[in-house]
């Protein structure tokens, strides 16, 4: 089996005005859809970031994959590293802090991961088995995800946003209502509150309101390192006994280590342990106890298995991070989560916030808080080419080429300045 063609299609998916530590989501999030054809008539699918730095690199690498076997993952890595991926980011790295697709770092791992998933899809399809079986077999067929809550503006805040029925979520009542809707629709059994956007006392009050409304749901809060160490310690006093884990409240590994020493709370991260070098430093510092994997920047599904083995070795918990994404990413996340025995926390996903889809059959169902794997070959997915064309056309006309939540907040509030940590 040899690769005969590789297509990379950038798309723009509608995204609501969700608040975070940098600012607010733009009306569109960018993704790249990857198709790889082989000489035996198979098609492998993948999805990754659509921001310019990643898109440019994908386009640079794709034609070098022709002639390669989809089983040759070392050959894929060699082609990625020999492509001299260069530097294209035009915005400061702090502005892009929460946008892994726009950041320059780890480009090779991101590009490798983007192609590794369709390679694995093709391997599994050629064997007539699902990707989870290729990865060692499903230890769970239903993978739990958490309700991912955001402080949010109404979609009326700017006519560019798609109208949505979620409404505004700034007060504790509105946040609880958002959680209720999400849990009623999808059956989630745990809750994550994206924080770092509003006053910390208010965010903690909202979390406590969630605790009262959903006393049996494990709760997480994620201020994306927008709280100083002092603030994170002060908030921890209100959070003892409330949290499943405390995710990235304060910047850098040293800060997280000091926070853990001061509070004893279980700390989680997708910001300060993002590669094996940081993993090693974390072991030395004893900073974070739960690592959020993300195959899109850790280097793919097999690299996620390596990370899982490392977590087991050092007795760390393992959970999963998410950015705005569609169903191909969701199913890649689900297949790997199904096959990793020690991925024992419900995974993050932004998927309920996205209305668009490029898959035949539409949105992937989330039922009882879970996405279920099947035994269909590969990822078990097929593209809806009309939907892909529509979303590609939108990419061409939307005017966004690189995620920047700071710039979007300045459009709504020109006086907005980025301060990290803000509180
Ligand atoms: O999309 O606003 C967002 C999130 O804040 C995202 O950028 C983060 O990377 O969800 C992520 C997280 O858990 O830190
Ligand atoms: Mg996080």
Image: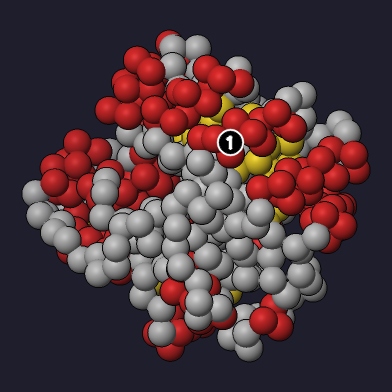
Coordinates of residue 117 in the picture (x, y in percent): 39, 46
How far from the left and from the top, in percent, is residue 362?
Answer: 65, 66
The residue positioned 43% from the left and 88% from the top of the image is: 397
Q: Position of residue 200 (x, y in %)?
A: 66, 48
Front-most of residues 247 and 414: 414
Residue drawn at the location 13% of the way across and 46% of the way down: 81
Q: In the rendering, at what x and y percent does residue 356 appear?
A: 61, 71
Q: In this rendering, would 328 be left or right of 124? A: right
Q: Where is 402 relative to 231, above or below?
A: below
Total numbered labels placed on residues in the image: 1
Helix or strand or loop: what does disc 1 sit on?
helix
- Name the residue located 62 percent from the left edge and 64 percent from the top edge: 18
> Are there few (<14), some (14-19), or many (20+) residues within 10 Å of tag 1?
many
Does the residue tagged 1 have its C-beta within 8 Å of any atom of ligand 2? no
The residue to which callout 1 is attached is 232
Residue 102 appears left or right of 78: right
Can residue 325 be seen in the rendering of this structure? no
Q: Residue 319 falls in which quadrant of the image?
A: top right
Q: Residue at x 56, y 67 (%)?
A: 24
């Amino acid at each position: 089996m040899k690769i005969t063609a590789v297509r990379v299609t950038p798309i723009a998916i509608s995204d609501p005005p969700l608040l975070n530590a940098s600012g607010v989501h733009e009306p569109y999030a960018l993704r790249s859809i990857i198709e790889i054809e082989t000489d035996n008539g198979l098609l492998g699918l993948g999805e990754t970031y659509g921001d310019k730095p990643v898109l440019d690199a994908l386009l640079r690498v794709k034609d070098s994959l022709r002639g390669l076997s989809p089983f040759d993952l070392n050959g894929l890595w060699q082609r990625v590293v020999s492509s001299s991926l260069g530097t294209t980011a035009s915005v400061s790295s702090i502005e892009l802090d929460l946008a892994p697709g726009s950041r320059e770092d780890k480009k090779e791992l991101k590009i490798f991961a983007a192609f590794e998933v369709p390679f694995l899809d093709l391997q599994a399809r050629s064997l007539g088995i699902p990707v989870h079986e290729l990865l060692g077999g499903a230890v769970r067929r239903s993978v739990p995800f958490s309700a991912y809550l955001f402080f949010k503006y109404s979609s009326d805040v700017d006519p560019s946003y798609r109208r949505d029925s979620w409404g505004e979520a700034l007060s504790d009542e509105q946040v609880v209502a958002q959680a209720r809707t999400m849990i009623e629709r999808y059956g989630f059994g745990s809750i994550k509150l994206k924080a770092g956007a509003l006053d910390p006392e208010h965010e903690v009050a909202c979390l406590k309101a969630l605790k009262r409304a959903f006393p049996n749901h494990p709760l997480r809060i994620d201020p994306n390192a927008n709280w100083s160490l002092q603030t994170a310690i002060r908030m921890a006093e209100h959070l003892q006994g409330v949290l499943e884990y405390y995710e990235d409240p304060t910047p850098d590994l040293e800060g997280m280590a000091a926070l853990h020493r001061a509070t004893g709370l279980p700390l989680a991260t997708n910001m300060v342990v993002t590669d094996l070098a940081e993993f090693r430093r974390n072991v030395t510092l004893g900073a974070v106890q739960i690592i959020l994997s993300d195959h899109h920047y850790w280097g793919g599904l097999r690299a996620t298995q390596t990370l899982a083995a490392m977590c087991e070795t050092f007795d760390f918990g393992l959970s999963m991070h998410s950015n705005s994404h569609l169903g191909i990413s969701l199913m890649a996340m689900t297949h790997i989560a199904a096959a990793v025995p020690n991925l024992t926390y419900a995974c993050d996903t932004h998927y309920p916030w996205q209305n668009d889809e490029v898959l035949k059959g539409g949105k992937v169902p989330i039922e009882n808080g879970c996405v279920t794997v099947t035994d269909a070959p590969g990822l078990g997915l097929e593209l809806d080419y009309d939907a892909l064309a529509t979303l590609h056309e939108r990419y061409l006309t939307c005017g966004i080429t690189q995620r920047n939540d700071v710039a979007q907040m300045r459009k709504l509030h020109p006086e907005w300045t980025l301060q990290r940590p803000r509180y």
